[in-house]
């Protein structure tokens, strides 16, 4: 379980997160939505301390990493997270096999001889086979997403963070990524946090949706509750999202 308490983050005088608090429970698929520039990526980066918060706690399974300066504590907690970057961030010069095995090398004590088996198993989970020897340049955008996801789940994370997983993808690939995210939760029981400006995606896949607006979660609830929200910022965001779909 992840307990976030009064999380603050500013860049200079620009306060991005203003005392954000929320509990993310085991097995949840929790989405954070909100307009561009509101701090969704900042939130997710603070969660694993890629960014250092100015105040507040981030308690992951009982350990507060909000302000700790112990590298070993941070490293241990980070091991329970997988992170799907918006751009995929595969290493161009490495093969698919090497890319997916990357985390195994740094995050686990698994012997090298077991890498190929694990890599093939993770690739199969995301619907790929016989691509181990290819380089990223030889893959389609959708295949790259799959390989990136296989890489982020290789070390068997308990939590997965997805930053804009479908941005810039065509509708077919978007549908595929959506299925992958729900599969990771269903098949592996991974607690997932998705950051997106795609309201429809969030409403479709999440157990709970939170809207970040001016540094705060102005609404947190199950999709059905969310749709009925009276909050003006939520209503406006729903209206705009609806318009942009037509
Ligand atoms: N490293 C940084 N230094 C200074 N300002 C930053 C930094 N990272 C983000 N910001 C600012 O913080 C604000 C929130 O950025 P963030 O990337 O978290 O927004 P976002 O909600 O993820 O936006 P998008 O939907 O466009 O991805 C923006 O105004 C951005 O310019
Ligand atoms: Mg972002």
Image (cartoon, rainbow, N blue to C red):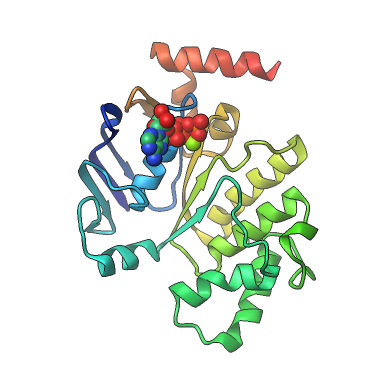
Name the quarter showing ligand 1. top left
Task: Relative to 147, say whether 107 is above or below.
Answer: below
Q: Looking at the image, which is closer to me, 78 or 224?
A: 78
Q: In the rendered picture of this protein, how many numbered marks are placed on residues?
A: 0
Residue at (52% x, 87% y) in the render:
111
Residue 245 placed where, x, y %? Answer: 68, 19
Residue at (57% x, 45% y) in the render:
86
Residue 212 placed where, x, y %? Answer: 39, 28
- Whether residue 39 is visible here, answered yes or no, is no
Relative horizontal placement of residue 173, taking residue 84 as reference (left or right): right
Q: Picture quarter containing residue 215?
A: top left
Q: Picture quarter containing residue 75?
A: bottom left
Residue at (31% x, 50% y) in the render:
2
Tell me the quarter of the image containing the C terminus. top right
Task: Relative to 49, say whether 200 is above or below.
Answer: above
Residue 216 placed where, x, y %? Answer: 31, 27
Q: Looking at the image, which is closer to me, 149 or 92?
A: 92
- Whether residue 202 is visible here, answered yes or no, is yes
Relative horizontal placement of residue 205, taking residue 68 as reference (left or right): right
Residue 100 placed where, x, y %? Answer: 61, 68
Task: Relative to 169, say whether 211 is above or below.
Answer: above
């Amino acid at each position: 379980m992840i307990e976030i308490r009064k999380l603050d983050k500013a860049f200079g005088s620009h306060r991005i997160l203003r005392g954000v608090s929320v509990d993310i429970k085991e097995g949840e698929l929790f989405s954070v939505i909100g307009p561009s520039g509101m701090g969704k990526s900042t939130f997710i980066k603070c969660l694993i301390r890629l960014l250092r918060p100015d105040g507040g706690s981030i308690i992951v399974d009982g350990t507060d990493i909000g302000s700790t300066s112990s590298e070993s504590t941070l490293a241990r907690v980070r091991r329970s997270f997988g992170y799907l970057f918006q751009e995929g961030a595969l290493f161009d010069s490495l093969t698919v096999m090497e890319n997916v095995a990357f985390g195994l090398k740094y995050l686990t004590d698994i012997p090298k001889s077991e890498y190929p088996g694990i890599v093939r198993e993770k690739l199969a989970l995301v619907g790929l086979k016989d691509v181990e020897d290819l380089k990223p340049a030889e893959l389609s955008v959708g295949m790259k997403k799959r390989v990136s996801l296989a890489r982020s789940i290789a070390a068997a994370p308990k939590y997965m963070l997805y930053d804009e997983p479908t941005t810039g993808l065509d509708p077919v690939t978007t549908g595929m990524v959506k299925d992958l995210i729900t599969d990771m939760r269903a098949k592996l029981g991974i607690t997932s946090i998705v950051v997106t400006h795609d309201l429809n995606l969030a409403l479709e896949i999440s157990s709970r949706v939170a809207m970040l607006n001016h540094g705060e979660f102005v609404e947190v609830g199950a999709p059905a509750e969310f749709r009925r929200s009276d909050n003006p910022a939520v209503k406006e965001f729903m209206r705009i999202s609806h318009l942009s779909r037509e």
